[in-house]
Image (cartoon, grey):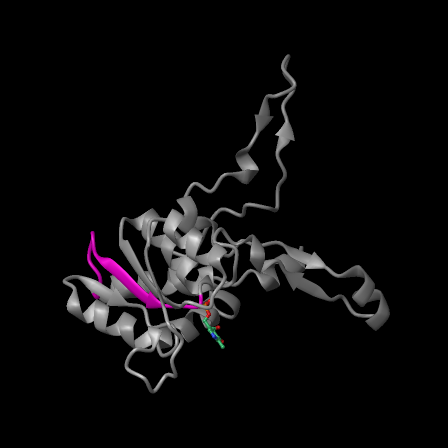
Amino acid sequence: MLTGKRLFSTGSRLLKSSTSYNYDFTGLISQTGLPGSVGNTPLLKLNKLSKQTGRNIFAKAEWMNPGGSVKDRAALFIIEQAEKKGLIKPGGTIVEGTAGNTGIGLAHVCRAKGYKCIIYMPNTQAPSKIQTLKLLGCEVNPVPVVPFTDPQNFNHLAKRRAESLENAYWTNQFDNLDNRQAHIEWYLGRYHQIFEDSRS
Ligand SMILES: Cc1ncc(COP(=O)(O)O)c(C=O)c1O
């Protein structure tokens, strides 16, 4: 489910109370957990660019997704499609080859949904991404950088690892059509918020 309570449209309000620390967090709470908070990023008006061009220019603050990047959208959609197609069952394992961002999105969704998460990534990626993935409970395999044609490429390693496990799904971001479909659904389909945001 890609709908979620908008996290950022309403700020917290100070309730009338004897204590100055009694805030109303209603507008900040996702009742649908982390998956429900994906995608509800603010639309920021870029005032300088808008003035220079004579047009309203907006930026979508995708770094404010819970995993810190736009890849959260695809991660959530791909996993939920796999669930719908019966390709992953409760307690299963998600396996992915990633440079880090898709992996972090997957790791968050896996934690929320109770899946294990195994990551293969080139060992040239930022140590902070590896640490983040480990903190999120993933098994992380940083591997030497080799061309795609090499069977030891991180992406092929992820595929083979998934094939070797029971109830495991290789999310395969590079060739999975649900990755493309995720963006169609989020930006053009029934889940998109840009038009909604820009109307208000
Ligand atoms: C050139 C390139 N490398 C790697 C990736 C994968 O990035 P990540 O796994 O960090 O989401 C992408 C996907 O956007 C890409 O375009």
Residue located 61% across and 46% down the image: 9
Position above or below: 112 against 81: above
Tell me where residue 140 appears, x and y as whole percent. Answer: 34, 59
Residue located 43% across and 75% down the image: 180
Residue located 16% across and 64% down the image: 165
Q: Quadrant of residue 12?
A: top right
Q: Residue furthest bottom?
A: 149
Instruction: State which region is magenta.
Output: 87-99
Q: Residue furthest left?
A: 166
Q: Quadrant of residue 3?
A: bottom left
Task: Please tell me which residue lies in front, 122 or 43.
Answer: 122
Residue located 62% across and 41% down the image: 10
Would you say 194 lies left or right of 128 here? right
Tell me where residue 60 appears, x and y as whole percent. Answer: 62, 61
* Residue 97 within the segment the image draws in magenta: yes
Dividing the image into 4 quarters, which one contains the N terminus? bottom left
Q: Residue furthest front?
A: 144
Tell me where residue 4 appears, x and y as whole percent. Answer: 46, 50
* Residue 195 within the segment the image draws in magenta: no
Would you say 13 lies left or right of 116 here? right
Task: Please tell me which residue lies in front, 28 or 113.
Answer: 113
Position above or below: 39 against 24: below
Would you say 50 lies left or right of 44 here? right
Tell me where residue 64 appears, x and y as whole percent. Answer: 56, 53
Would you say 54 lies left or right of 83 here? right
Dividing the image into 4 quarters, which one contains the C terminus? bottom right
